[in-house]
Amino acid sequence: MKHLLSLWAIGAVLSHSIAIAAPLGLPTNVCTGSFCGLAQREIWNRFENATGLDVGLIPSVYSGSCYHNSPIVDPHIRHFGGMLIDKLDGQVFFDGKFSFYEETQPYARLNVETARVQFGERRDVTLREEFAYAEASDSLKPFRYWFRQDASGDGLLLVGYFGYQHTILCTLDRHRN
């Protein structure tokens, strides 16, 4: 069975509480408990050692592996994420999607032009020296994302909190096309 959800729609199916890090700082204690297997620990360690978003790489499309810690998803099954980081009138924004239970990477062939069509929403990104941050919350469901550039290349690392009791860790490669 294949599922495709926008980054924001995922929170609509969740209904529990989570401790959320302060939005102006980096998240802490993301890799804990049964969620933190070898793959998740590696992503978290890379995230902790990463740098701020390289604005010289904008616009860019990123895609890769994601792990979700949620009551409805096995935290050790790899899923996929795809994301566009773009700029318009000096404002940086992003949008993207997660794909669940796919056998192959569904976002691998996207370029900036196709991603602009496929990922049509513009979510504002706040740039800080050591990270980028985006929030799209309503009064009931927080949606928070932190992005950092991988210190060993131009890939992107993403940590997110969606709705309630849903954490995500992603390692995303920058597309060269």
Image (cartoon, rainbow, N blue to C red):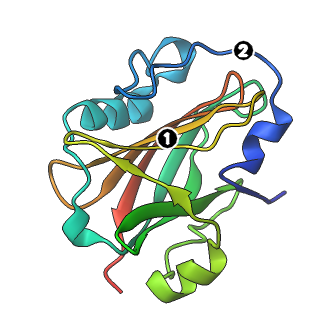
Of the numbered discs 2 and 1, the one sitting upstream in the chain is: 2
Q: In the drawing, does residue 164 fall left or right of residue 20?
A: right
- For mark 1, give the secondary structure: strand
Quadrant in the rendering for residue 6: bottom right
Looking at the rendered structure, the kind of residue marked 2 is: Ser
Across and down, in percent, residue 129 comes to 19, 42
**Marking on residue 17:** 2
Query: Which residue has dot 1 on it?
Result: 145
Closest to the observer, 92 or 147: 92
Examine the rendering and report whether any part of residue 111 can be seen.
no
Quarter holding the N terminus is: bottom right
User: Do labels 2 and 1 touch, CB within 8 Å?
Assistant: no
Residue 80 quadrant: bottom right
Rendered-image quadrant of the C terminus: bottom left
Horizontal placement of 126 versus 3: left or right? Answer: left
State the mark number for residue 128. Answer: none
Q: Is residue 138 above or below residue 89?
A: above
Q: Position of residue 135 (x, y in %)?
A: 55, 41
Rendered location of residue 69, percent (x, y):
62, 28
Name which residue lies at 50% across and 55% down: 124
